[in-house]
Amino acid sequence: MAPTLTSPRNSDELAEMLADPARAKQIMETPKALADFIDEYANRQQGDGTELQRQIDEGVQRGLANMLRDNDEKADRSSVQDSIRRLNLDPQTRPANMLTSHKQATAYNPKAVGSALDGKFENAADYFRHAWHLNRDPQARAKMDGIRNAYSSVVPADGGFLVPETLRSQLLQIALESSVVRSRATVVPMETARVPFPMIDSTTNVGSVFGGMIGYWGEEGAALVESNPKFGRAELDAKKLTGFALVPNELLQDSLISFSALIETLWPMALAFFEDVAFMSGSGTGEPLGFLGGENPAGIAVPKESGQTADTIVLENVIKMYSRMLPSSLARGIWVCSPEAIPELYTMALSVGTGGGPVMLTNVAGPAPMTIFGRPLVVSEKAGRLGDRSDLSFVDLSYYLVGDRQQMTAASSTEYKFGEDKTAYRIIQRVDGRPWLQSAITPANDGPSLSPFVEIAERA
């Protein structure tokens, strides 16, 4: 009778055993003998008590813990105010936090009010065809009347019909492509008309950070130094952005479907345009508070140069603007300028002794996008006129909050221009915006204040 084989403890012993003709023959003497040998070797390598099994168990436990934590977080998000308390206040981590990503509020939200209408219309053209108040189809009228009655308690009393969530998210996705601010801002979905959002009430980093958090070195057993960090809150209060257009009734009667397709294209572009106007220069009264100009409490305006000519931008302005940006925002900042500022920027010169040379205009055929100090230059007609404080800005828009109510309504009427045989279309979107910081920040070295919103003072 052949001696019983001892199962190898590792790959080296296995190789040695298979290299021995006598033992290899014993292992593969019968199919059952080979199967028993493989099972025994596998159990010895990864059975209970082995190092591999211990690593597997730890991995499974970590996976379960992560899954439970994620599920808890998803369940808690049924309350926006609860979820906000857990938000990371550093915009640098914003892409990892879906609640504060612009994609979150733009993408389809199954919890939005309009999601209840999903599937009731084939497409946008079908929705607008049903919503047209002159549609004489009794089934279409009955369908829209039912929707109006069903959602009268959840849709603000502005009249009109709730827009399906699929259509709303589609419109905003298109708007995102042409927007300056929303695509770069911290966007917060709003489940109520007013949402509080946490912010750090910080004005200086001299001796403390984040409004009062202190780090210090000390001997073991020494008394602790107390700190009193201040956390404030910003109120996002949904404002009403109304889109209004007059359309000849002949166009609607002859080609309603074509008109609906036009709405799908033009309304998102108009939405992005007027949102940008308010997000950039809004007064904060009945509209969002913009980040440009003196209304922004966190904004900085670098002084103009001594003797600087009115309505000009010089290289020293640009360098000093760059130096006043928060260091952590230098990798995210963008330059926003008025079209009028382009000649000033591209003819700026660096003086060297009695000579010099252009700073930016080295190759007109160079690739887009244009950059200054390696950061993108965005040209926008919503910026200020040349010489105004807002004609050129250097901003980190992750420090700008956009609150999106994620609710849209549409309505039509012939009463306003009845005598001209025109139909008035109205689309209402609720949104708010404001800078996240309440003031510029004095750096740790007690130097000039820094901010994610930097401009040049007026050069009149």
Image (spheres, rainbow, N blue to C red):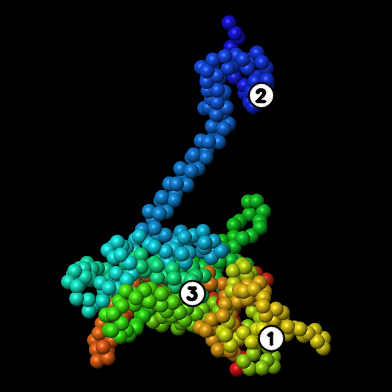
User: x, y (%) of residue 256?
Assistant: 30, 76
What percent of the width, then of the height, locates residue 56? 53, 36
Expressed as whole percent of the image width and height from the top left, the position of residue 11 reads 64, 27
Q: Which of 163 and 388 is in front in this view?
A: 163
- Taking the view exactly as shown, the residue that stands out farthest to the front is 254
Marker disc for residue 15: 2
Residue at left 62%, top 23%? 9
Residue at the location (55% across, 29% down)? 46
- Give the distance between the C-alpha atoms of the residues marked 1 and 2, in whole angstroms: 75 Å
Disc 2/disc 3 C-alpha distance (Å): 64 Å
Q: Can I make out residue 415 in this image?
A: yes
Q: What amino acid type should be assigned to the residue bearing mark 2?
A: Ala
Instruction: Give the mark, 1 or 3, whose residue is nearer the N terminus.
Output: 3
Front-lying residue, 111 or 370: 370
Find numbered disc 2 in the image and state the secondary structure of the residue it sits on. helix
Q: Which amino acid does label 1 sit on?
A: Thr
The residue that label 1 is drawn on is 347
